[in-house]
Image (spheres, helix red, strand yellow):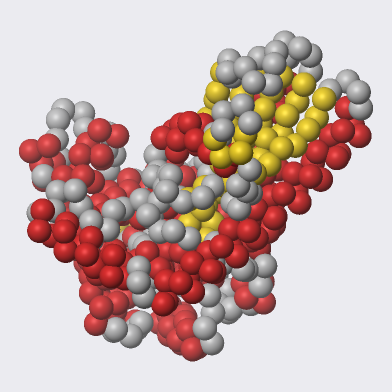
């Protein structure tokens, strides 16, 4: 279980993690742009999906099942193979799907844990729907749900010896639960005698911050961290705290917080430890990245399912046609045009800076040049009589397929080509594209591909590589301060990776 840590057998060093919790300026000043960059488009699409989409309802059910599965794996309650994980997420928790070596515990016990987790995350959605207040009693009820089929927890006696004790379900701890980390350091959580007052403090601080409209990303991260330092239950704290963070996110229109097994140590724990040291930004950013990952999946959920009846599809189409006549969409279209131009301008400014810097650095040794096509460009390419904007569709389609999202070809796109001519035989084009992502018109993806060019400019490319770097997805409607910095950072990381690949080939 989650309190079980390797012991060295020596007298441990001590790290006092807990101190009376407070919301400091370090938390208040955290950058939330990783989520803000895309949230506007998500909230627009969310309304459409909630109103019409059966596929969205099933998408939410899959997310809930994923949360239940990954929670138990991260807490080392069980292991599951990748294959059965995918089957459970897509088809539901059925023991008949299990094969030999899919898990390391008895199937009956596994199903009990999974269903306990799933019932708890479903209850989170019910709490939000019923607008129940955040309270100590609600936290205790969550603990009862997730530990329903767990009878014991690990404790330590006065000498530090491990022992199994009955798990108090829905009650705060009676024994110290200070683990010893693999490096031999003993972590001190809140002593049992202070837990009740600290949990009251946490609830009161949460309510005050909610009234002050603290960003839900910061609020969820702070509650998660504060609760973790208290560690109020004998066992089950990790399960409960991610449900509490999920509650805050779902209430704000986002998704449950699911920490994937492959992220638990390299991202989640490391970021949480940085918050322990007084630097909460990495933890806030990580939780934002988890939300953004699910938003990008949701933006690719169809409003109208292809499995719907013919009559239902016709009705949905009629409703959309009617909606397009509304004046509100005209205003939205204007905002979209302005937003697209802003994103193009940010990319254009940065890539012009890169072009000039590379020309100075390489001089006459390498031919460096920048070509571009904006969302508004209507030039005709003489050789093909096709609109300038129509170029690079195949490359964008390949990139979208590689990263498993829907590219809307009916809406305008823009592109940049950063060219490198090393010799007649060694020419490369780095393509940076800005195109529509998913089914919400305001969501845009910035992506990249690499072309190996022939001797002449009009030659068919020898090779086109849609890069493994995931797209940077941003809402055209967002004007937050971090938007430009995030786009420039993405372009810098992309060009760094591309140039490294070119350098390894020439």
Q: Nearer the viewer, residue 28 or 160?
A: 28
Quarter holding the C terminus is top right
Q: Quadrant of residue 476?
A: bottom right
- Asked if residue 477 lies left or right of residue 92, the reply is right
Q: Position of residue 490 (x, y in %)?
A: 64, 46
Give the quarter of the image for residue 251.
bottom left
292 or 226: nearer the viewer: 292
For this orientation, the residue located farthest to the top is 425
**Residue beneath the point at 67% across and 77% down:** 25
* Residue 233 visible in the shown view: no
Residue placed most toward the observer, 208 or 41? 41
| Residue 34 image-quadrant placement | bottom right
Residue 363 higher or lower than 505, as above or below? below
Q: Is residue 91 above or below residue 480?
A: above
Q: Position of residue 294 (x, y in %)?
A: 40, 54
**Residue under the point 74% across and 44% down:** 351
Q: Give the percent coordinates (x, y) of residue 464.
A: 55, 23
Residue 466 vs 264, above or below: the answer is above
Determine the residue positioned at 15% across, 40% down. Answer: 106
Q: Number of marks in the image?
A: 0
Q: Is residue 137 left or right of residue 466?
A: left
Q: Is residue 22 visible?
A: yes
**Where residue 282 sits: x, y (%)?**
60, 57
Query: For the point 55% across and 25% down, which residue is it?
Result: 465
464 relative to 433, above or below: above
Q: Which one is nearer the viewer's eye here, 83 or 45?
A: 45
């Amino acid at each position: 279980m989650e309190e079980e840590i390797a012991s060295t057998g020596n007298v441990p060093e001590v790290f006092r993690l807990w101190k009376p919790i407070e919301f400091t300026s370090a938390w208040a000043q955290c950058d939330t742009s990783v989520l803000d960059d895309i949230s506007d488009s998500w909230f627009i699409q969310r309304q459409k999906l909630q109103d019409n989409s059966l596929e969205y309802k099933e998408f939410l059910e899959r997310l809930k099942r994923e949360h239940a599965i990954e929670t138990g794996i991260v807490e080392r309650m069980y292991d599951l193979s990748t294959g059965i994980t995918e089957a459970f997420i897509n088809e539901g928790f059925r023991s008949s799907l299990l094969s030999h070596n899919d898990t390391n515990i008895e199937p009956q016990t596994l199903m009990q844990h999974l269903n306990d987790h799933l019932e708890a995350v479903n209850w989170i959605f019910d709490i939000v729907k019923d607008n129940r207040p955040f309270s100590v009693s609600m936290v205790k009820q969550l603990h009862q749900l997730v530990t329903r089929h767990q009878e014991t927890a690990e404790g330590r006696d006065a000498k530090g010896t491990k022992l199994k004790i009955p798990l108090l379900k829905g009650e705060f701890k009676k024994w110290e639960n200070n683990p010893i980390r693999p490096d031999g350091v003993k972590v001190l959580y809140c002593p049992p005698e202070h837990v009740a007052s600290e949990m009251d403090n946490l609830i009161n601080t949460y309510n005050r911050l909610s009234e002050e409209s603290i960003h839900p990303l910061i609020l969820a991260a702070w509650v998660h961290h504060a609760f973790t330092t208290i560690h109020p239950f004998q066992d089950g704290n990790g399960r409960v705290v991610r449900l509490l963070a999920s509650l805050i996110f779902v209430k704000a229109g986002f998704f449950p917080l699911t920490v994937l097994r492959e992220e638990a140590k390299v991202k989640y724990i490391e970021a949480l430890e940085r918050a322990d040291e007084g630097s909460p930004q990495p933890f806030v950013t990580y939780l934002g990245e988890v939300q953004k990952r699910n938003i990008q999946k949701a933006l690719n959920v169809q409003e109208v399912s292809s499995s719907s009846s013919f009559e239902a599809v016709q009705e949905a189409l009629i409703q959309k046609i009617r909606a397009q006549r509304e004046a509100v969409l005209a205003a939205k279209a204007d905002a979209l045009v302005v937003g697209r131009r802003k994103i193009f301008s940010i990319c254009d400014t940065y890539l012009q800076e890169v072009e000039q810097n590379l020309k100075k650095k390489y001089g006459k040794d390498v031919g460096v040049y920048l070509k571009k096509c904006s969302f508004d460009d209507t030039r005709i390419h003489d050789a093909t009589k096709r609109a300038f904007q129509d170029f690079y569709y195949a490359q964008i389609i390949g990139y979208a397929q590689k990263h498993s999202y829907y590219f809307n070809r009916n809406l305008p796109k823009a592109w940049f080509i950063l060219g490198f001519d090393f010799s007649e035989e060694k020419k490369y084009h780095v393509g940076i594209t800005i195109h529509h992502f998913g089914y919400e018109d305001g969501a845009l993806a910035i992506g990249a591909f690499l072309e190996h060019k022939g001797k002449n400019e009009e030659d068919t490319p020898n090779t086109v590589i849609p890069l493994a770097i995931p797209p940077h997805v941003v809402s055209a409607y967002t004007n937050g301060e971090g938007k430009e910095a995030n786009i420039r950072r993405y372009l810098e990381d992309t060009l760094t990776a591309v140039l490294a690949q070119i350098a390894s080939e020439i």
